């Protein structure tokens, strides 16, 4: 079986990493799986790019920047990503796709596949799977919905847009997607039960075929190292309680919940049951230099870590991973932390409860409660059997999210899709 994956980027962002990890797992399971990206950042020769050469790559970069500029012109200055599909590519003549038995779509925004380009894929007469890494595929433009329920109808009156109304830009984009989906036969893959439920709520895709299959990761890269040793190797005090968090762009950022983390750490630092001199926060990922918050505990910023083995070393060194995100599908960081034997403290939101079992391998705090988030950190801090807690975190990933398990589930879906497709064509 030959499978061709389409993603905007090669490992840049959560969807890209999830796509590449699935591709590796499928190849290890014996499939012929390849990835085709719109813009290639890395140098892996096995990943195919639509832009070989400096000029085509520059042209694609211009399209990506144009889409982002147009999107910013229409949307308010809020931390809710919104995409206006103004640029794209018709891939119906692409040789890699023609040669494949099945096409698997991932994140296709940023001047890659507009609704009309998606519709053109039907010319290839191939079964199509589509993993939804965020909500954009079934909304009128936004990638994160929070409490907005307009996607349950036909969007319009979009709270993200500067000019909103019943027939605003979000409604027009919604209609373009409906027109494309009516011509495109595809099977939705939802990485979390939350995402599957969201799709079923949408007017655009509530009747779509959906399979819940989580993302995966390399458990030989993301694996536990004994805590004190890992701390020493990372240059950290072995006697300190190390908290790790990722992607801390700004104290104003709502999506990643930074304000709630700050409040929780304030509460933690003031607790009489916590030795403030023993607690330390380390943060990896991008950050907004102009809006870096003041943390109430000792904090070290690591910057972006692109090497998975180095990242895994920090996960192993941490005693708890903190993710105050307010909406997330199936965040890679949570799975990576658990795989390294590090419990997770998070809000009860999105697909996180698919991975974190409350007081078994981490702590699920009440949504938007800084007080309960602080209680979760303190629960890990004071845990009577931390080694057992760490072991349970690792076991969760081995049992539910390892490469062989997730590859097998995808292969079963692919086989079913191919059988159904052949049956339809035989009629």
Image (cartoon, rainbow, N blue to C red):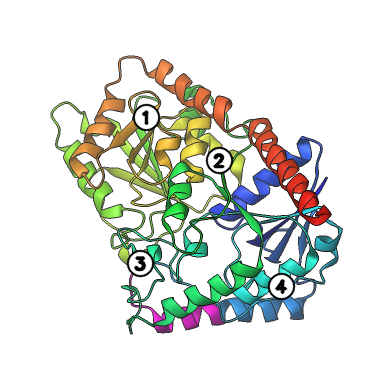
Q: CA distance from mark 1 to mark 3?
A: 33 Å
Q: CA distance from mark 4 to mark 2?
A: 28 Å
Asked whether residue 418 is drawn in magenta, I would say no
Contact between labelled residues 3 and 1, with CB atoms less than 8 Å apart: no
Question: In the picture shown, does residue 209 fall above or below 378?
Answer: below
SS under mark 1? strand
Q: Which residues are magenta?
A: 66-79
Return the disc, 1 or 3, that comes first in the chain's sequence.
3
Magenta stretch prevailing secondary structure: helix
* Near-viewer residue (292 or 190): 190
Q: Quadrant of the C terminus?
A: bottom right
Return the disc, 1 or 2, that comes first in the chain's sequence.
2
Residue that numbered label 3 is attached to: 150
Q: CA distance from mark 1 to mark 4?
A: 45 Å
Contact between labelled residues 2 and 3, with CB atoms less than 8 Å apart: no
Return the disc, 4 or 3, that comes first in the chain's sequence.
4
Q: Mark 1 against mark 4, which lies toward the viewer?
A: 4
In the figure, residue 376 lies in which quadrant? Answer: top left
- Can the viewer see residue 49? yes
The numbered mark at residue 120 is: 4
């Amino acid at each position: 079986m030959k499978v061709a994956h389409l993603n905007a980027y090669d490992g840049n962002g959560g969807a890209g990493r999830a796509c590449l990890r699935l591709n590796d797992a499928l190849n290890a399971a014996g499939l012929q799986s390849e990835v085709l990206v719109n813009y290639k950042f890395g140098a892996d020769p096995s990943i195919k790019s639509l832009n070989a050469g400096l000029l085509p790559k520059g042209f694609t970069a211009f399209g990506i920047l144009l889409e982002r500029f147009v999107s910013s012109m229409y949307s308010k200055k809020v931390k809710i990503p919104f995409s206006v599909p103004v640029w794209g590519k018709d891939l119906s003549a692409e040789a890699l796709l023609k040669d494949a038995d099945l096409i698997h779509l991932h994140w296709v925004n940023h001047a890659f596949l507009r609704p009309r380009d998606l519709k053109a894929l039907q010319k290839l007469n191939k079964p199509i799977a589509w993993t939804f890494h965020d909500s954009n595929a079934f909304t009128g433009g936004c990638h994160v919905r929070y409490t907005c329920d307009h996607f349950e109808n036909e969007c319009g009156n979009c709270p993200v847009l500067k000019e909103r109304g019943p027939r605003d830009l979000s409604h027009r984009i919604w209609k373009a997607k409906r027109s494309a989906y009516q011509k495109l036969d595809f099977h939705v893959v939802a990485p979390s039960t939350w995402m599957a439920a969201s799709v079923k709520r949408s007017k655009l895709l509530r009747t779509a075929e959906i399979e819940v299959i989580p993302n995966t990761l390399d458990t030989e890269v993301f694996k536990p190292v004994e805590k004190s040793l890992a701390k020493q190797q990372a240059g950290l005090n072995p006697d300190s309680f190390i908290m790790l968090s990722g992607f801390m762009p700004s104290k104003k950022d709502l999506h990643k919940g930074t304000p709630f983390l700050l409040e929780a750490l304030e509460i933690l630092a003031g607790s009489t049951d916590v030795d403030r001199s023993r607690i330390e926060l380390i943060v990896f990922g991008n950050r907004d230099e102009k809006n870096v918050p003041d943390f109430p505990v000792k904090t070290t910023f690591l910057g972006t870590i692109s090497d998975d083995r180095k990242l895994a070393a920090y996960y192993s060194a941490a005693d708890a991973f903190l993710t105050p995100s307010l909406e997330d599908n199936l965040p890679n960081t949570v799975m990576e932390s658990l795989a390294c034997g590090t419990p997770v403290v998070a809000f009860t939101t999105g697909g996180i409860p698919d991975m974190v079992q409350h007081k078994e391998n981490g702590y699920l705090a009440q949504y938007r409660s800084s007080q309960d988030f602080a209680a979760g950190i303190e629960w890990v801090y004071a845990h009577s059997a931390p080694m057992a807690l760490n072991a349970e975190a690792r076991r969760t990933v081995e049992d539910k999210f390892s490469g062989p398990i997730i590859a097998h589930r995808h292969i079963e879906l692919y086989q079913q899709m191919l059988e159904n497709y052949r049956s339809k064509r035989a009629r």
